[in-house]
Image: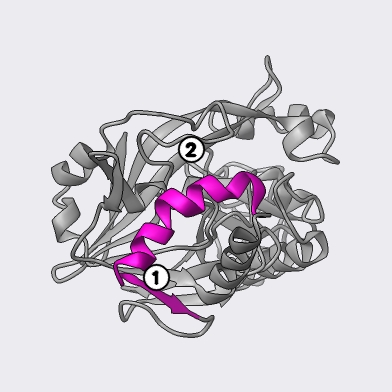
């Protein structure tokens, strides 16, 4: 699946390997009651949650920023033919490379591959199988990984204690490092002259988000800070995979506040849609609006003395927006 939109002269493209109701709600987000999801079902179904099976809907995907002189991948999904612990991710076979070619971002045209963190569902297309060897999928690109994540993952791998993440590290990270294509960065070091990484520890120690500013827009590629819009309402609820719970909560609260304050568009790593999420403050609490469920438009309220008031407000009354007359006549709905 491919979706795209323009941000000035840059094209943002979402290449989705697969999407579906993959994770049980109670297992993945323990602490958010099902009743809260049921109360918000019109927002959540079918893109974020399926009531019949009580499962969260996740997309496995690659983000592409395509400009005249650069083609940047932000995370590289699951990849083909790789053994994983998750039954949804192991040994999948998708035409993701064909889709990249179709959008003009063939593997040899990719200039940068940047990673928010090093979990297996974010690094899979780093490599491809070549006669039993894992070789770089994007041979002309420079790959970038958070230095803190690399340090932790490499240490655990060397000690034989990386666990469920080891297979992905072996087949999708080490082969890139072995041929000298992998570079490490720290928060605050801009990549590709357009992506600014911000520390977002919690899901992993070295996880980062990337902020992209262009043509008057501010976009935040939010990694795995958010797995559901409901975490905007329940920001202290972590996913099952968050390795450092306290840090994950602080990171999530900071991201939510930043998005609400700046009007940034948020792109969670596993959410469908190139329009992203807008997090807005409706007094309190904050709420999340996705592109598939835009906020209800507000109509200008009527001035009940419109026949004698110079404002001549004539639109229908809207019970959701009682407000003073814009001409400061003092009249309200």
Q: Is residue 190 magenta?
A: no
Residue at 80% x, 59% y: name it: 245
Which region shows up in magenta? 162-185
Q: Nearer the viewer, residue 113 or 128?
A: 128
Q: Which residue is mark 1?
A: 144
Q: Position of residue 210 (x, y in %)?
A: 48, 69
Magenta stretch: dominant SS?
A: helix
Check the image and report above or below for 18 versus 52.
below
Residue at 74% x, 44% y: name it: 240
Q: Nearer the viewer, mark 2 or mark 1?
A: 1
Query: Mark 2 or mark 1: which comes first in sequence?
Result: 2
Q: Position of residue 231 (x, y in %)?
A: 72, 49
Q: Is residue 299 visible?
A: no
* Picture mark count: 2
Check the image and report above or below for 184 versus 128.
below
- Mark 2–mark 1 Cα distance, whole angstroms, equals 22 Å
SS of the residue at dot 1?
strand
Q: Left or right: where does residue 195 sit relative to residue 157?
A: left
Q: Position of residue 215 (x, y in %)?
A: 31, 73
Are the residues at dot 2 and dot 1 in contact (C-beta closer than 8 Å)?
no
Q: Position of residue 17 (x, y in %)?
A: 37, 35
Residue at 30% x, 70% y: name it: 181
Check the image and report above or below for 57 versus 184.
above
Q: Is residue 171 visible?
A: yes
Q: Left or right: where does residue 27 sit relative to residue 44?
A: right
The picture quadrant where one finds residue 313 is bottom right
Crowding at dot 2, Cα within 10 Å, few <14 / some 14-19 / many 20+, comes out as many
SS of the residue at dot 2?
strand
Q: Which residue is mark 2?
A: 59
The picture quadrant where one finds residue 279 is bottom right
């Amino acid at each position: 699946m491919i979706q795209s939109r323009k941000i000035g002269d840059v094209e943002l493209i979402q290449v989705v390997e697969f999407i579906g109701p993959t994770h049980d709600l109670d297992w993945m987000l323990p602490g958010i009651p099902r009743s809260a999801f049921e109360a918000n079902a019109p927002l959540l179904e079918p893109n974020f949650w399926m009531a019949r099976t009580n499962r969260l809907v996740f997309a496995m995907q690659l983000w592409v920023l395509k400009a005249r002189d650069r083609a940047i991948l932000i995370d590289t999904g699951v990849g083909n033919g790789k053994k994983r612990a998750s039954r949804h991710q192991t040994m999948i076979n998708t035409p993701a490379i064909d889709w990249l070619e179709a959008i003009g971002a063939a593997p040899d045209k990719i200039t940068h591959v940047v990673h928010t963190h090093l979990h297996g569902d974010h690094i899979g297309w780093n490599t491809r199988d070549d006669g039993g060897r894992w070789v770089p999928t994007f041979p002309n690109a420079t790959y970038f990984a958070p230095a803190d994540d690399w340090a932790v993952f490499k240490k655990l791998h060397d000690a034989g204690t990386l666990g469920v993440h080891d297979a992905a590290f072996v087949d999708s990270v080490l082969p890139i490092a072995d041929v000298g294509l992998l570079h490490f960065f720290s928060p605050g070091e801009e990549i590709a002259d357009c992506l600014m990484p911000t520390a977002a520890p919690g899901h992993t120690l070295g996880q980062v988000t990337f902020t992209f500013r262009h043509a008057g827009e501010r976009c935040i590629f939010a990694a795995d800070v958010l797995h559901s819009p409901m975490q905007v309402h329940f920001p202290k609820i972590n996913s099952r995979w968050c390795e450092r719970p306290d840090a994950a909560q602080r990171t999530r609260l900071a991201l939510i506040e930043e998005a609400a304050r700046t009007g940034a568009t948020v792109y969670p790593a596993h959410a469908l849609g190139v329009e992203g999420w807008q997090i807005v403050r409706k007094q309190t609490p904050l709420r999340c609006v996705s592109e598939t469920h835009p906020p209800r438009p507000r109509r200008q309220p009527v001035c009940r003395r419109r026949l004698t008031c110079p404002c001549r407000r004539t639109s229908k009354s809207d019970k959701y927006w009682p407000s003073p007359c814009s001409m400061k006549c003092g009249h309200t709905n």
